[in-house]
Image: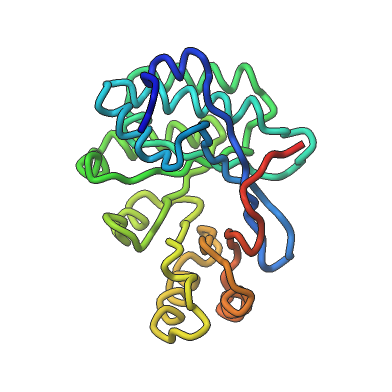
Amino acid sequence: MIPVSIREMIDKRQFEHVYQPLWDLFNWSIFGYESLLRVNGINNVEHLFQKAREEGCLYELDLALLESSIFQFPFLENKGRLLFLNVYPSTILHHEFKPFLKRVVERFPYIENRIVFELNETKEEEGIWKDGELKAAIELMRGYGFYIAIDDVGKGASTLQKIIELQPDYVKLDRYFAQGLAANEEKQKMVSLLASYCGRKMVLVLEGIEEEVDLAQAKLLRVPAAQGYLLGKPGKLT
């Protein structure tokens, strides 16, 4: 249950962020962090976004979270590391998003080439992916020095078609492929195929690594990057 209205929560900034590391498996080092939302009294933040959609303020919530994530992230203490931010396609297409990008770049000039926008998928927004304006908006974002990722590939509505057409900088493979990877030959084949396809054009990130044996298998398959509780749980950065 969500006790307050979304607009009230946005106005009072009743939320915080934790950051989960992403690891470069070739050089064995942290190359970035994903910002994740936490709200007191709410275990499933997806319900929060659903309520925001119902209240007609999903864009306002998305924007507030993006800005606060950037503001709270210690860029200077994490030189060279990227910040991964989740965003809905509908937010990217909103008429106020372009002015927001301009404002953020002017306010935080040090974030150039340090932000990766992860495109979230929902059934409600599936049609947006077919909108030609989305590709144009992505090119605009790249023009401002931002990178693009497609999240949860292999789950739900994610398709290879989106990867081919949008050519993201990062492809985040759903945790399903990490679970039991070492014992599942079919998963190994698929992960290997995607790693080969991405090559040097895109960075494949395997999400949900929780077991050492699956991490070892990912390395054998030449997966360049990974994320998961084994590598680091979400937490505060100081």
Task: Give the residue at x 32% y 29%.
Answer: 93
In the image, residue 147 above or below residue 15: below
Position in image of residue 174 (x %, y %): 43, 61
Position in image of residue 227 (x %, y %): 58, 59
> Based on the displayed image, in which of its 4 quarters is residue 119 positioned?
top left
Q: Please state if 190 lies on the left or on the right of 23 as rendered.
A: left
Viewer-closest of 207 and 54: 54
> Is there any visible trace of residue 204 in the rendered image?
no
Q: What is the quadrant of the C terminus in the image?
A: top right
> Is there any visible trace of residue 221 in the rendered image?
yes
Count of marks placed on residues: 0
Task: Give the residue at x 37% y 40%.
Answer: 46
Viewer-closest of 153 and 161: 153
Position in image of residue 193 (x %, y %): 43, 75
Task: Give the residue at x 52% y 64%.
Answer: 206
In the image, residue 26 above or below residue 43: below
> Based on the displayed image, in which of its 4 quarters is residue 164 positioned?
bottom left
Task: Give the residue at x 48% y 44%.
Answer: 148
Viewer-closest of 200 and 31: 31
